[in-house]
Image (tube, rainbow, N blue to C red):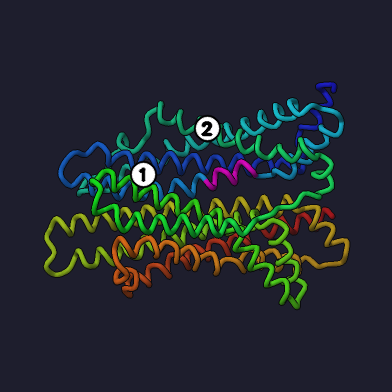
């Protein structure tokens, strides 16, 4: 095919420039947060005094609790506007372009978009590092030099972002290469099998046993590595079982739906449970984090009792600082994940919204259905994630810390803030939906 025709088909339409900007913003946010989180954690690994292992253990756990959700957010960024890209690439396949040509085109586009966002993320990391360096631990600020990553480590993170974008593009191409006509007619379906629940249950059961047994038989460093890995595996499992849970819940809601918006909301979730999970996956991570924050607050309350030593009080103060930093990072992740995914979803379903408008459905009904498709799974997601985290924490710290009033209050506050962020983003993306109706 003539290369000028190829370039024309790959060029985004003017109205899709905003769609193209979304993954750039997402990759920028992801890169900034990943670099900043890793930079903050690395500052603890240079300490060699007797108390250093405690700080390093807490830093490793916080790193896993933040980086694993950020990797999920990075995957979502790589999939942004996939439908638009798939439709353009399926056109090329129908016009006779070889699978290799389509692969080169889409990987190149994905890498360029990811590179633009990642470079912006490096600038964001450098800009944030002086502020992060002001955070005090052990009575003094960490310092800019301790939290900013050296060029070699920044290059490794950038390479990881580009590899993630390339891999996601190649995986997404499978259905385009196999069935381009199915993509054009939107005939492909998303299926989530109940086997996901079995995988999740087995993983969590193994994690509980290891958390219960390993601290008594392993060394300190090994125990830190194992615990961090187990918490990361549990977070990853939430992404595996989450779409299946939403599918089951939406199926029940569909049978009981008596209003148009309830029916439409259930159908939206069932149409793509994975996409629906990406809308609320951020709150799952925040809820998981909330249990650790609550038990940490309760533990600090015990450590700073009336007979506490000065060293214990100083350690509790530093733990409190670490918890605040981790929670702020969690909320930033939730806001970025939910906001970008919602905006992308509205733009990606523009044709559906136009069709509903032509059928006579008012904007208010579609907007209520869209918000219900997001808010309805939140309660299940928040409670389920918190229960998973509690199951993992109980063998380590006991049930008394989790059920302490201060712990429960902290958990409720963190989950409440996370749900509030999701609710706010549903209103913030309403103008995009209105724009789709106005251009119908």
Q: Horizontally, is 152 left or right of 273 in the view?
A: left
Q: Of all residues shown, which one is farthest toward the top?
A: 2
Residue 180 occupies quadrant? top right
- The structure residue drawn at horizontal position 45% and vertical position 41%, both measured from the top left corner, is 34
Dot 2 or dot 1: first in sequence order is 2
Q: Give coordinates of residue 416: x percent, y percent.
A: 48, 68
Between residue 14 and residue 202, name the one nearer to us.
202
Secondary structure character of the magenta stretch overall = helix
Q: Identify the magenta region.
A: 72-79
- The N terminus lies in quadrant: top right
Total marks shown come to 2
- The C terminus lies in quadrant: bottom right
Q: Give coordinates of residue 377: x percent, y percent.
A: 60, 66
Q: Give coordinates of residue 154: x percent, y percent.
A: 43, 31
* Secondary structure category for the residue under label 1: helix
Q: Give coordinates of residue 221: x percent, y percent.
A: 26, 43
- The structure residue drawn at horizontal position 44% and vertical position 66%, both measured from the top left corner, is 387
* Secondary structure category for the residue under label 2: helix
Q: Horizontally, is 303 left or right of 163 in the view?
A: left
- The structure residue drawn at horizontal position 27% and vertical position 39%, both measured from the top left corner, is 45
Question: Which residue has dot 2 on it?
Answer: 119
Between residue 410 and residue 13, name the one nearer to us.
410
Between residue 222 and residue 141, name the one nearer to us.
222
Q: Horizontally, is 131 left or right of 30 in the view?
A: left
Question: Which residue has dot 1 on it?
Answer: 131
């Amino acid at each position: 095919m003539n290369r000028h025709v190829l370039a024309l088909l790959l060029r985004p339409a003017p109205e899709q420039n905003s769609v193209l900007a979304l993954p750039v913003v997402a990759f920028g946010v992801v890169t900034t947060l990943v670099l900043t989180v890793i930079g903050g954690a690395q500052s603890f690994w240079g300490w060699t005094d007797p108390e250093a292992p405690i700080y390093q253990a807490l830093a490793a756990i916080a790193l896993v609790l933040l980086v694993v959700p950020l990797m999920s957010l990075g995957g979502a960024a790589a999939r942004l506007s996939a439908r638009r890209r798939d439709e353009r690439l399926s056109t090329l396949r129908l016009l006779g372009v070889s699978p290799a040509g389509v692969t080169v085109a889409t990987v190149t586009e994905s890498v360029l978009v990811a590179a633009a966002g990642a470079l912006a993320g490096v600038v964001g990391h450098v800009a944030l590092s002086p502020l992060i360096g002001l955070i005090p631990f052990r009575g003094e600020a960490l310092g800019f030099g301790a939290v900013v990553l050296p060029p070699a480590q920044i290059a490794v993170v950038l390479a990881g972002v580009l590899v993630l974008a390339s891999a996601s593009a190649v995986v997404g191409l499978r259905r385009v290469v196999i069935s381009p006509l199915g993509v054009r007619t939107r005939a492909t379906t998303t299926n989530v099998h109940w086997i996901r629940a079995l995988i999740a249950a087995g993983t969590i059961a193994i994690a509980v046993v290891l958390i219960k047994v390993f601290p008594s038989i392993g060394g300190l460093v090994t125990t830190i590595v194992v615990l961090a890995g187990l918490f990361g595996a549990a977070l990853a499992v939430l992404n595996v079982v989450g779409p299946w849970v939403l599918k089951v819940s939406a199926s029940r809601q569909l049978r009981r739906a008596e209003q148009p918006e309830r029916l439409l909301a259930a159908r939206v979730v069932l149409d793509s449970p994975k996409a629906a999970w990406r809308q609320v996956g951020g709150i799952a991570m925040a809820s998981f984090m909330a249990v650790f924050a609550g038990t940490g607050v309760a533990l600090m309350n015990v450590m700073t009792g009336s007979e506490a030593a000065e060293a214990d009080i100083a350690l509790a103060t530093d733990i409190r600082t670490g918890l605040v930093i981790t929670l702020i990072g969690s909320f930033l992740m939730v806001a970025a994940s939910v906001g970008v995914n919602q905006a992308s979803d509205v733009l990606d379903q523009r044709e559906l919204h136009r069709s509903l408008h032509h059928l006579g459905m008012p904007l208010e009904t579609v907007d209520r259905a869209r918000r219900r498709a997001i808010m309805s799974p939140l309660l299940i997601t928040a409670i389920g994630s918190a229960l998973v985290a509690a199951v993992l924490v109980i063998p380590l710290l006991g049930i008394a810390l989790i059920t302490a009033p201060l712990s429960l209050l902290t958990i409720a506050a963190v989950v409440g803030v996370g749900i509030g962020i999701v609710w706010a983003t549903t209103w913030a993306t309403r103008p995009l939906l209105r724009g789709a109706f106005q251009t119908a």
